[in-house]
Image (spheres, rainbow, N blue to C red):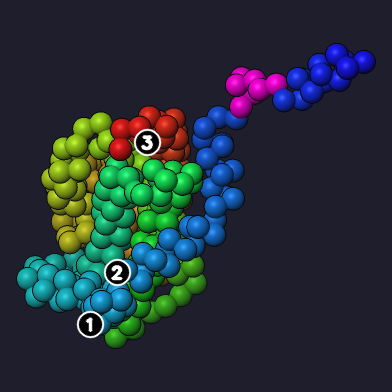
Amino acid sequence: MKRTADALDAREYDYDSARRRSPMVEEVVELRRYRDLVRQLVTRNIKVRYQHSVLGVGWSVLSPLLTTAVLSLVFLTLFRQTAPDYPAYLLSGLLLWNFFIQTTSTMAVEMAGGTDLWKRVYTPRTVYAIATLATGVVHLVLAMVPLVALMLWLGIPTGAAWIAAPFAIVCVALFALGVGLTLAVLAVRFRDVLDLYQVVAGAWMYLTPVIYPRSIVPERYQWLLALNPMTWFIECFRLPLLENTMPDPVMAGLALTAALGTAGLGWWAFTRSADDLATRL
């Protein structure tokens, strides 16, 4: 009778690695358990960024406005015919582009560099990536305040199509998550990846209609813009706000596919390598 009970206990505590869920799924489950930590990290990130600055949160408003003012002085006359409301056109593109670049760069640096919590206390590795992403979204929402004010000042009409703008923000956030996690995996193995990314990002910006209207690009080069996911995200963001027009369904579908595919690929690559990354940090 005792041997039977011991056998039952053995079966109860028997561990079968084949029955484990995939690392991707396990990370999602663990991340849900640590959602309070994500909120605390986001709060910390915001406080650290603004607590010792003179203007505080005002920097999220002032910085893009100053950049827009300078670039508008340079390019307004040049693009007046193709982009009548050029300051709003420019600012909307800059906000989404800066959100993407700053989020991916910060995420890669923090994840590749490691943190004390990684080495001392168990937490899902993606907690820090999600916290960085959420912090970036908060900054983006704050920076949209001057965009809305500028649009109202320029007399750009509001409309029901504005409800489509968050779709673009969600898409570019997912895309940034995938790119940031992929960069983190590569940066742990190859330290010069982050420096290379800054160079690529500079060239990437000029291949994206952030500063210039897409219509000025010669027809034979339009395919370069059409293959650029950031073009889809920015167009899906601008059309509802500046033209009160819903994004083209094909373009919206491409944007969503690119966002989900990149996020999934980055999540898979990072969770698959998370244990190895921890030993390398």
The residue depicted at 16 percent of the width and 37 percent of the height is 192
Q: Mark 1 highlights which residue?
A: 54
Secondary-structure class at tag 3 = helix
The residue depicted at 22 percent of the width and 67 percent of the height is 90
Q: CA gap, disc 2 to disc 3?
A: 27 Å
Q: Mark 2 highlights which residue?
A: 49
Quadrant for the C terminus, please.
Answer: top left
Magenta part of the chain: 14-20
Q: Mark 3 highlights which residue?
A: 278
Mark 2 vs 3, N-terminal side = 2
Secondary-structure class at tag 2 = helix
Q: Is residue 121 left or right of residue 196?
A: right
Please state which amino acid type lies under the numbered disc 2. Arg
The one nearer the camera, 72 or 273, is 273
| Dot 3 alpha-carbon crowd within 10 angstroms: few under 14, some 14 to 19, many 20 or more | some
Expressed as whole percent of the image width and height from the top left, the position of residue 189 reads 25, 31
Q: Residue furthest bottom?
A: 153
Q: CA gap, disc 3 to disc 1?
A: 37 Å
| Dot 1 alpha-carbon crowd within 10 angstroms: few under 14, some 14 to 19, many 20 or more | few
